[in-house]
Structures are given as C-alpha cells and as structure tokens.
C-alpha cells in the first residue's frame, strides 16, 4: 500500500521527506509507504498529473494519490485549459484532469469510486509557506534571535504580491547575505521541526489549514495520524 504525492519539483520532494520523516517511519511500520513524485515544474505538473495519478489509482485499489502543486504563480495559465484563479479552482482542475485520464486513457466510464482515493490540494502559495510556519528552526537557520513573523497570519494567507518564497528570499538576503537555496535550506529547516509545530502555533491556532487538510486526509485513509 502506498501514498503517492505529486509535487512540482525536487525542492518540494526533499522538504516533505524531511518534514514527514517520523510519520513516514510510522506509516512504514503499518505497511504504508509514501512516495513523493516531482514532475519538474508547474507546467509539467499540470500536463502530466492526469495520466500519472490515474495510473496509480488503477494499478492498485488500495493506493492513495495526493496532488500538491504550488498555487502561485497562476497568471501564466490565464485563458488556457489550465486556468485557475484560486485554490478551489486549482483543486477542481486537478480533479478534472485525473477524471479525464481515467475515462479517456483507461476507459473507465464511471471513475467516481477511484476518485475517492485522490485528494487534490496545493501548497498555498508555495513550499516556503511551511518555512514561515517553522519559526524556531527558521531563526536558527538565519542565525538570528529576532522575533520575525511580520507576515500574514496564518502564513497561508500570504498573497501573490508577496508570496512566502519572496518573504524567505528577503530574510536570507538580510540575515545571511546570500541567496536562499530551496533544495538545501528548506529540508534543513523542516528536518528539525515537528510536524505539529508546522500545523499549530504556540497558542494551538492552525497555521496551515490547507496543508493540514492533506495530512489529515492521509492520516484518516491510512489510519496513521501525522501528529
């Protein structure tokens, strides 16, 4: 039994592997694996998700599939078949792409039962939202005791004029005088951050409700909660 999580790129894969390390070991003990599959970039993700996700759903009736692209940017897809203005539209688009692949590629006229094992979501707006929710380890990485946190609460409420990645890049430039490196900095921060601390702040307010819904869905389907 396996959970297939489709993401845009290698940085997303490495970051989630780091953040979910403890959970992955508990899932493995219960007979579940998690495979995080990068599809190169957002355009490739949208082009490939349908057939790739459909193949996993058809191949094994117990496997689960999650769609986890970045919401930002989306202006490049205006007036195309991949147009999506917000999270609900992106979720609907992913569902449509998988349904079309099930019916057209795998000749399944009624894919509803298989679609119950597919969860379309997103990193809102990008991977770096998880770093904004990991304040303690972010401070350590930046080598500062400054309070930080001068951004939208919850972090997922950042907008496209100032997405999480822009915030993180500014912080690395300010404190470390270097560029942010997503494939090394993000895993380093998240590897030492308990998953619960990403999902909840010190007052137990949910920091990343969209990301939490992904964790909760996998936990419910597998019977192994993430936190």
Image (cartoon, grey):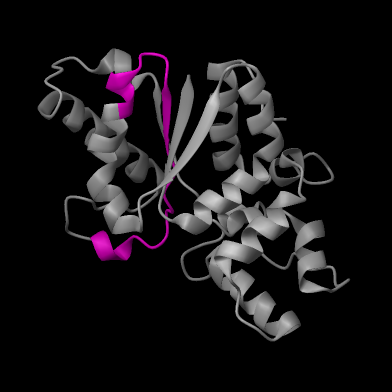
Seen in the picture, residue 80 relative to 62 is either above or below; the reply is below
Q: Residue at x 61, y 71 (%)?
A: 167
Query: Residue 32: percent from the left, percent from the top?
Result: 55, 21
| Quadrant housing residue 120 | top left
Q: Residue at x 69, y 25 (%)?
A: 26
| Quadrant housing residue 48 | top left
Give whichever of 27, 148 is nearer the camera.
27
Give whichever of 2, 126 is nearer the camera.
2
Seen in the picture, residue 95 relative to 151 is either above or below; the reply is above
Query: Residue 168: percent from the left, percent from the top?
Result: 63, 70
Query: Residue 69: percent from the left, percent from the top?
Result: 41, 49
Spot the residue most to the right: 145
| Quadrant housing residue 222 | top right
Q: Residue at x 82, y 58 (%)?
A: 136
Whether residue 176 is visible to the viewer of this picture, yes or no, is yes
Whether residue 152 is visible to the viewer of this picture, yes or no, is no
The C terminus - image quarter: top right
Q: Read off the magenta span.
A: 56-77
In this rendering, the count of numbered labels is 0
Spot the residue most to the bottom: 177
Q: Residue at x 64, y 56 (%)?
A: 187
Q: Is residue 207 left or right of residue 197?
A: left
**Residue 70 within the magenta-colored segment of the rendering:** yes
């Amino acid at each position: 039994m396996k959970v297939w999580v489709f993401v845009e790129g290698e940085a997303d894969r490495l970051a989630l592997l780091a953040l979910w390390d403890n959970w992955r070991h508990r899932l493995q003990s219960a007979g579940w694996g998690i495979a995080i599959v990068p599809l190169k970039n957002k355009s490739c993700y949208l082009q490939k998700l349908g057939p790739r996700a459909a193949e996993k759903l058809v191949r094994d009736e117990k496997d689960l599939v999650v769609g986890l692209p970045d919401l930002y940017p989306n202006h490049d897809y205006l007036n195309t078949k991949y147009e999506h203005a917000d999270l609900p539209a992106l979720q609907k688009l992913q569902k449509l792409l998988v349904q079309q692949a099930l019916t057209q590629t795998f000749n399944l006229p009624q894919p509803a039962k298989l679609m119950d094992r597919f969860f379309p979501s997103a990193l809102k707006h990008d991977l770096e939202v998880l770093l904004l929710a990991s304040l303690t380890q972010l401070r350590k990485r930046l080598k500062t005791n400054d309070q930080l946190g001068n951004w939208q609460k919850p972090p997922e409420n950042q907008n496209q004029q100032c997405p999480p990645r822009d915030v993180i890049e500014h912080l690395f430039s300010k404190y470390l005088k270097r560029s942010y490196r997503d494939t090394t900095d993000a895993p380093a921060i998240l590897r030492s951050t308990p998953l619960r601390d990403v999902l909840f702040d010190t007052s137990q307010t949910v920091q990343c409700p969209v990301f939490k819904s992904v964790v909760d869905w996998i936990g419910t389907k597998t019977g192994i909660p993430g936190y």
